[in-house]
Image (spheres, grey):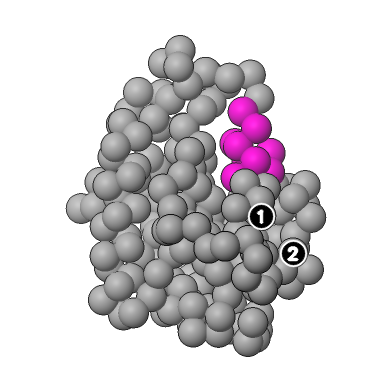
Amino acid sequence: MANVSPPVTRTAPPRPALFLDRDGVLNEDPGYVHRWEDFHWIPGAREAVAAFNRAGWWVFVVTNQSGVGRGYYAEDDVVTLHAKMSESLAEIEARIDAFYYCPQHPDAALDAYRHPDPPDRKPNPGMILRALNEWPVDLSRSIMIGDKPSDLEAARRAGIRGLLFPGDDLMAFLQPELKPA
């Protein structure tokens, strides 16, 4: 599932993409964050998005959202939270080019979201592969930032480099990767 910016023509020149897990990379992760009042940016997260935007990179969020399938919250809550994130980023002239999320889970309480091995659920690469199919991405210069081994495995399976974010300041962590598109 995704809510995305208007698609860019696939004939546009490819650019590197920064793929970001959401919970634990962009925001603090106490578990199942789905309301804006519970969302707290990781230090340097908004600044990192803005810096990569200015450098000409695509910026995508790829996030497992099993709380939907478990019945903890609705897909509308995910979409609303992503819209609030976009509003917050716009305050500093930054943007996420597309949000991709996976509400499916093998143990989902709701039948509609139960799948034995959801192709979009990390460590599977489905969300990343969809972005690569929908946007003109320079695969060789793209990176995935995650806080779990499953994020890095999804990156590996999609053919992009993955980096494990240890927490703290996202901009400081990503500074060595920041190069013009």
Q: Main secondary structure of the magenta part?
A: loop
Q: Quadrant of residue 75?
A: top left
Residue 27, which numbered label? Answer: none
Disc 1 residue type (three-letter): Leu
Q: Which amino acid is tagged 2?
A: Leu
Q: Which residue is mark 1?
A: 132
Q: Quadrant of the C terminus?
A: bottom right
Does residue 110 sit above or below 166 in this rendering?
above
Q: Where is residue 132, by image quadrant?
A: bottom right
Residue with the most extreme top position: 111
Q: Which structural element holds mark 2?
A: helix
Which is more toward the observer, 70 or 159? 159
Q: Is residue 95 left or right of residue 145?
A: left
Q: Is residue 124 above or below residue 23?
A: above
Magenta span: 118-128
Q: Give percent across and percent down for residue 175.
A: 59, 84
Residue indicated by mark 2: 139
What residue lies at 53% left-to-right and 26% top-to-bottom?
105
Circles 1 and 2 in contact, beta carbons < 8 Å: yes
Q: Judge whether residue 173 is colored magenta.
A: no
Please say whether residue 105 is visible from this viewpoint. yes
